[in-house]
């Protein structure tokens, strides 16, 4: 089926589309052009190698084509666009610099003109980043006598994003430790300055050093107007409607954190963690079973007519079975007695014994509305530290990114010995990949992906994550070591001073 669609849209691998002006109405022309772009995009998706040639001498048509190709997502970097026109360069220069299609995508312009010596063509390209800044460069010329002649060291359709030539990229970011945060450092001259740090920052700084650009942080609210947002977001299918992602470099491991359970000194710990209604139900069932067994014992339907147990023995046996400390020394001989005993053992095991936990979990998780119930128990809006503080005081859990929660617990919720007061569950509540959002069909995606992949394969990202936690956990021992050295030096000086007099 895909091959049939290819042959229908582009027989012999070639498709030709025409968008004619509709009586001078720009809106109708724009609509027809958008339909053509959508058809051409179908061919581009089905073909691995795809080039587009646009022939027009109308500047407004070229401007409409640039807008429609961007809206219709016609071009990716692998798609080569060649515009053939007879318009002078002076009229095209502004369009080449202002349009995303011509300035950022893999596009060139071939300008043909008639000269006394015959026809001549020049090949031009807009370079957004170059040693002299953004400019329109002439790559080659063509004449029937000399053929194609390259005028620069650049090839045709060069990579525009292999080198940013020291330009400054504005990137949005926010404090999200350990991925992106600010810290105060003291320079050798004694002055203090603010330095960026974090796992995602170090990865983006590596990309910046490789591609030769500098970083300027802007507010996170402006991230829609930038080339990339180097703060990781979960790769969710619904988000692809608005933007794409660079190469995913980490996992969106959202975990739960709760206060560590401990022994309570209050008398309520005798019946914790079951609620009072549960205990009343257990006592009620125990009384009912006890009465049934006493009646069956009196009428001889429990252990037979010749063997009747004492009432006190039955009470001890029932309560002992409930708490898992005893079992009937004399098994019932009657069927009715065996049924009562079996039901009571099942009730005791499910209610009290530890091995009943798996059975209860299975019954709880088997319901089809568990996710709805979970959503009803969730409360959105708490900041990280506020949520962890609430989890410390109340019987609640806080959900956050795993690494973020670990480092904040180590910094703000640890005891004097350095042990965390909150624990983090091992499993992830929402496992999935995470990456940096970028615009749809961004032409520089392959360059960023190459740098990110090289850093991941070298193990740098994992090392940066380990360093963040190690530094936090080692602050206490390092302070103790420093305090011990200072105290030892002070004691040594006091002991040596009298001997020198």
Image (cartoon, rainbow, N blue to C red):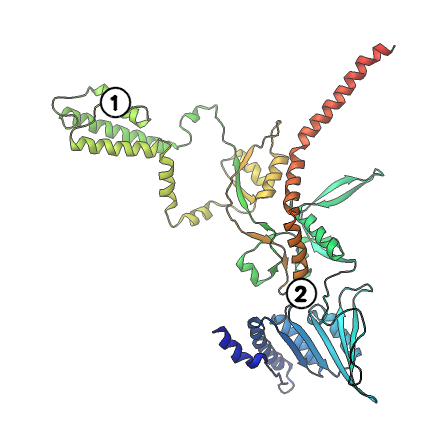
Percent of width and height locating residue 376? 45, 47
Work out which residue is located at the far front of the displayed protein and give it: 146
- Dot 2 corresponds to which residue? 443
- Image quadrant where one finds the C terminus: top right
As drawn, 30 above or below 333: below
In this orientation, which residue lies closer to the viewer: 23 or 152? 152
**Would you identify the image quadrant in which residue 247 lies?**
bottom right
As drawn, 474 above or below 311: below
- Residue 38 left/right relative to 326: right
Q: Are the residues tagged 1 and 2 within 8 Å (C-beta)?
A: no
**Would you identify the image quadrant in which residue 349 lies?**
top left
- Dot 1 corresponds to which residue? 315
Q: Name the mark nearer the viewer: 1 or 2.
A: 2
Name the residue rendered at 27%, 21% in the picture.
316
Percent of width and height locating residue 34? 60, 77
Q: Is residue 47 visible?
A: yes
Measure the alpha-carbon separation of dots 1 and 2. 80 Å
- Asked which secondary structure carries label 1, the reply is helix
**Crowd band around label 2 with a 10 angstrom C-alpha radius: few (<14), some (14–19), many (20+):** many
Work out which residue is located at the far left of the displayed protein and give it: 305
- Residue 356 left/right relative to 475: left
- Asked which secondary structure carries label 2, the reply is loop
Work out which residue is located at the far right of the displayed protein and give it: 501
Disc 1 or 2, which lies upstream in sequence? 1
In this orientation, which residue lies closer to the viewer: 309 or 271? 309
Name the residue rendered at 31%, 27% in the picture.
322
Percent of width and height locating residue 298? 15, 24
**Crowd band around label 1 with a 10 angstrom C-alpha radius: few (<14), some (14–19), many (20+):** some
């Amino acid at each position: 089926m895909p091959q049939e669609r290819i042959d229908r849209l582009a027989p012999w691998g070639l498709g030709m589309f025409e968008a004619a002006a509709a009586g001078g109405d720009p809106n109708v022309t724009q609509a027809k052009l958008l339909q053509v772009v959508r058809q051409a995009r179908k061919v581009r998706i089905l073909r691995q190698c795809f080039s587009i040639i646009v022939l027009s001498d109308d500047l407004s048509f070229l401007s409409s084509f640039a807008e429609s190709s961007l809206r219709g997502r016609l071009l990716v970097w692998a798609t080569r666009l060649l515009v053939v026109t007879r318009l002078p360069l002076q009229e095209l220069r502004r369009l080449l610099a202002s349009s995303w299609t011509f300035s950022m995508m893999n596009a060139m312009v071939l300008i043909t003109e008639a000269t006394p010596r015959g026809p001549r063509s020049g090949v031009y390209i807009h370079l957004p980043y170059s040693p002299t800044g953004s400019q329109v460069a002439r790559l080659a010329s063509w004449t029937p006598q000399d053929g194609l002649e390259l005028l620069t060291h650049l090839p045709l359709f060069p990579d525009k994003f292999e080198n940013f030539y020291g330009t400054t990229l504005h990137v949005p970011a926010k404090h999200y430790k350990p991925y992106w945060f600010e810290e105060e450092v003291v320079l050798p001259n004694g002055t203090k300055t603010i330095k960026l740090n974090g796992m995602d920052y170090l990865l983006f700084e590596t990309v910046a050093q490789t591609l030769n650009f500098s970083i300027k942080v802007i507010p996170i609210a402006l991230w829609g107007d930038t080339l990339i947002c180097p703060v990781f977001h979960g790769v969710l299918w619904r988000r692809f409607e608005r933007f794409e992602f660079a190469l995913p470099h980490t996992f969106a491991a959202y975990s739960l954190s709760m206060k560590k359970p401990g022994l309570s000194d209050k008398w309520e710990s005798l019946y914790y963690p079951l609620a009072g209604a549960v205990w009343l139900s257990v006592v009620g069932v125990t009384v009912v079973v006890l009465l049934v067994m006493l009646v069956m014992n009196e009428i001889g339907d429990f252990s037979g007519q010749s063997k009747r147990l004492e009432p006190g023995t039955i009470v001890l046996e029932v309560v002992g079975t409930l708490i898992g400390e005893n079992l009937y020394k004399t098994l019932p001989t009657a069927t009715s007695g065996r049924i009562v005993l079996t039901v009571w053992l099942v009730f005791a095991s499910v209610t009290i014994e530890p091995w009943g936990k798996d059975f209860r979990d299975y019954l709880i998780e088997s319901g089809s509305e568990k996710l709805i119930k979970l959503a009803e128990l969730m409360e959105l809006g708490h900041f990280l530290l506020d949520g962890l503080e609430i989890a410390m005081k109340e019987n609640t859990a806080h959900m956050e990114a795993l690494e973020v929660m670990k480092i904040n617990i180590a910094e703000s919720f640890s005891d004097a010995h350095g042990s965390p007061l909150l624990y983090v569950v091992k499993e992830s509540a929402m496992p999935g990949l995470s990456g940096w959002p970028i615009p749809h069909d961004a032409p520089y995606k392959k360059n960023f992906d190459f740098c990110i992949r090289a850093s991941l394969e070298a193990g740098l990202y994992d090392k940066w994550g380990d360093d963040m936690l190690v530094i936090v956990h080692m602050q206490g021992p390092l302070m103790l070591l420093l305090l011990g050295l200072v105290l030892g030096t002070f004691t040594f000086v006091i002991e040596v001073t009298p001997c020198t007099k």
